[in-house]
């Protein structure tokens, strides 16, 4: 009885008693959700256009952030470093398309998945070789990102929001809007959607698959760079960040591999669910449940919708 | 010329269905077994036995386990390390409860514990397919790893949080613990791995294996042909976890000697997935080849600069090692996406007609 009370009643009572704490937890969940969503977004872009389950997205986030900070530490002005980092991501996209994707076209999914593991290893090695393995500070002031916190007085308590988190949420929203515009209104965007629908049909109307793949990987690289800046500003830039890539998997699966809105909604659900679970239910089992809760949340959703919340319905024929 | 089946007639169905239908293959197998059981323990030095052969065999067993699930049944899993952990912790609990029972019995029994846990986490596979299934196995990976770290009962409430292999004997010879010689440990591992490989080979060539492969190729069609998806998929999960569990128990008891939860992290799962894919999906020989290649590659890369006399800092070597492994994976996938097992087959085919290719 006590256990049932602690499981099903007590957390809600706590939430009701301290609504300001609840709001704070929700906000923190929302922020980490936004960042998960951004990583998942990179995954979705690549999966939609090339059918590749890109395991390297997480490491691309780290690599992009490292490049930016690395260039800055070499004495390059901040915004030039940003431009150079974008250039590096472009080079990376072209190289990946040329060296990995083109020779492996038409192979089974799992082979392509493995190839992105190869990319992950190369990027880890390269990043550590060039920029060193030590954690670095993200150059927030130089990029004019806000610092400090604002406090609100609501519901009889204080809720403090980090300004950088607010900026992250806004930038994420802007980026998603830009991407949506890019996909819906531009020529390349239409070509991207055509490739996502059917490779063969797209080829037959004269869309170059190779070019599209390079563009998609470049777009994912930009998304990775933005994610890297935001995440790096909250903690620091190091290879420990790659663990978050694995957190993006449940997000992705929850939202559906092929859906951009799914990635965002999935990210928010996982982020908020994880923080609430850790804060209110975690102490019951000794804490640290953040490491696996996300996967169980995703699993619970999947049992009812095997293709994810927004994924295309899987139709199987014989 | 040397590898040709001309003149070998099959006079019964049993001969036709044999796993090794060609005499040269049987001779080759006998040579390999003789080398492994007699020559290597007789002439191998300590380093070779305990740092090369034992790990390779342990990983090969885990790779066979994953291959049964991913290669034969087509269910992708990223939870291999966690199931290995279940085997290791189960074996530790069992042997500290009942110290009198032979350790080999407990190693096999811990496989069954792991099989049960694996089947539990395999339940979602009935509804979830493809990459979506990865999340179920990742849930297993992170949840089980959390359990290893957070449940003190699993480590008998010791303060270090690690499990340590107590000394156990087989025929009066210590095979676990500090006093076990590399030779005895190697022979035990080899014996278990050889037996289980033989069992797996029979399994995948029989009715069960055919059902698995049918499910892999198209599960709906398999269901229409009268294969029960529930039992087949769960059996695949159970057998796969059984192999992983035994391999985990061998790893801790006969190789590491002690283990912390950090041994069974996700990177270990990735490593075994590499082995399976580089070795060849759906091939037992491939599992061995993949395990040997992926395990020995970093060792060779580490020893290489010193052997060539190139002065490089240790850290640089480690970074270069990452790059080289990554590049090799990509190059290898491009050159032969079906893995080492396919290379082996092509090689055998070439050998058949050598030296007259027409």
Image (spheres, coloured by chain):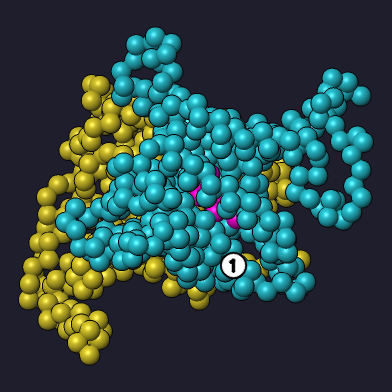
Chain colours: A yellow, B cyan
As drawn, A153 above or below B241 = below
Image-based side of B58 in relation to A175, left or right: right
Dot 1: within a 10 Å radius of its alpha carbon, few (fewer than 14), some, or many (20 or more) residues?
some
Look at 49% across and 42% down and name the residue there. B187
Label 1 marks which chain's residue? Answer: B
Look at 16% across and 56% down and name the residue there. B159
Q: Main secondary structure of the magenta part?
A: helix
Image-based side of B103 in relation to B291, left or right: left
Horizontal and vertical percent for residue B166?
A: 29, 52
As drawn, B319 above or below A203 = above
As drawn, A79 above or below A263 = above
As drawn, B266 above or below B134 = above
Horizontal and vertical percent for residue A125?
A: 39, 30
The quarter of the image holding the N terminus of chain B is top right
Residue B70 visible: no
Q: Based on the displayed image, in which of its 4 quarters is residue A286 positioned?
A: bottom left
Stretch of the chain drawn in magenta: B60-68
Between B68 and B108, the one lying in front of the other is B108
Disc 1 element: helix
The quarter of the image holding the C terminus of chain B is top right
Q: Mark 1 points at which residue?
A: B235
Look at 73% across and 35% down and name the residue there. B27
């Amino acid at each position: 009885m006590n256990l049932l009370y602690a499981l099903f009643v007590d957390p809600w009572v706590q939430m009701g008693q301290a609504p300001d704490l609840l709001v704070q937890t929700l906000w923190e969940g929302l922020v980490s959700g936004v960042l998960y969503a951004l990583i998942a977004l990179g995954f979705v872009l690549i999966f939609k256009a090339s059918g590749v389950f890109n395991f390297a997205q997480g490491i691309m986030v780290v690599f992009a952030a490292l490049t930016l900070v690395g260039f800055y530490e070499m004495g390059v002005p901040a915004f030039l470093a940003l431009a150079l980092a974008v250039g590096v991501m472009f080079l990376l996209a072209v190289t990946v398309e040329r060296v990995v994707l083109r020779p492996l076209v038409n192979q089974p999914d799992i082979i392509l998945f493995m190839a992105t593991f190869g990319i992950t290893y190369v990027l880890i090695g390269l990043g550590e070789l060039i920029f060193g393995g030590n954690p670095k500070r993200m150059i927030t002031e130089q990029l004019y990102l806000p610092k400090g916190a604002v406090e609100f007085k609501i519901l009889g308590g204080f809720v403090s929001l980090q300004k950088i988190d607010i900026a992250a949420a806004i930038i994420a929203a802007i980026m998603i809007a830009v991407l949506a515009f890019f996909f819906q209104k531009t020529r390349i965007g239409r070509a991207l959607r055509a490739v996502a629908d059917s490779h063969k049909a797209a080829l037959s109307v004269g869309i170059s698959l190779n070019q599209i793949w390079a563009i998609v990987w470049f777009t994912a690289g930009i998304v990775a760079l933005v994610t890297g800046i935001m995440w790096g500003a909250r903690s620091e830039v190091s290879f420990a960040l790659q663990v978050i890539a694995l957190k993006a998997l449940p997000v992705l699966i929850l939202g559906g591999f092929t859906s951009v809105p799914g990635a965002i909604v999935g990210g928010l659900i996982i982020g908020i669910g994880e923080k609430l679970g850790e804060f209110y239910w975690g102490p019951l089992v000794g804490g640290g449940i953040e490491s696996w809760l996300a996967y169980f949340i995703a699993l619970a959703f999947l049992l009812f919708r095997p293709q994810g919340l927004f994924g295309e319905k899987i139709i199987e024929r014989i | 010329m040397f590898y040709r089946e001309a003149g070998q007639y099959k006079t019964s169905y049993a001969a036709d269905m044999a796993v090794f239908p060609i005499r040269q293959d049987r001779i080759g197998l006998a040579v390999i077994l003789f080398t492994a059981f007699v020559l290597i323990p007789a002439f191998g030095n300590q380093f070779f036995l305990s740092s090369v052969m034992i790990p390779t065999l342990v990983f090969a067993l885990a790779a066979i386990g994953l291959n049964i699930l991913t290669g034969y049944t087509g269910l992708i899993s990223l939870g291999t390390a966690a199931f290995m952990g279940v085997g290791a912790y189960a074996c530790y609990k069992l042997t500290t409860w009942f110290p009198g029972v032979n350790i080999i019995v407990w190693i096999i029994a811990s496989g069954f514990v792991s099989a049960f846990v694996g089947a539990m986490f395999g339940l979602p596979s009935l509804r979830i397919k493809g990459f979506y299934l990865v999340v179920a196995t990742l849930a297993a990976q992170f949840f089980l790893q959390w359990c290893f770290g957070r449940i003190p009962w699993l480590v008998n409430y010791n303060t270090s949080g690690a499990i340590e292999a107590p000394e156990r004997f087989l025929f009066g010879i210590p095979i676990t613990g500090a006093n076990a010689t590399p030779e005895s440990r190697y022979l035990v591992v080899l014996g278990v791995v050889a037996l289980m490989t033989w069992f797996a080979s029979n399994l995948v060539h029989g009715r069960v294996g055919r059902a698995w492969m049918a499910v892999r190729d198209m599960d709906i069609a398999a269901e229409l042909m009268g294969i029960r998806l529930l039992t087949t998929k769960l059996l695949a999960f159970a057998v796969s976890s059984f192999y992983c569990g035994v391999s985990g128990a061998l790893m801790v008891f006969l190789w590491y000697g002690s283990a912390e939860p950090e041994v069974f992290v996700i990177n270990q799962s990735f490593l075994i997935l590499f082995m399976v894919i580089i070795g060849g999906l759906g091939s037992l020989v491939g599992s061995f080849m993949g395990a040997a290649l992926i395990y020995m590659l970093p060792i060779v890369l580490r020893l290489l600069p010193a052997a060539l006399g190139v002065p490089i800092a240790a850290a640089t070597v480690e970074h270069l090692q990452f790059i080289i492994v990554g590049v090799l994976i990509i190059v290898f996938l491009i050159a032969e996406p079906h893995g080492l097992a396919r290379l082996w087959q092509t090689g055998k085919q070439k050998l058949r007609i050598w030296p007259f290719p027409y």
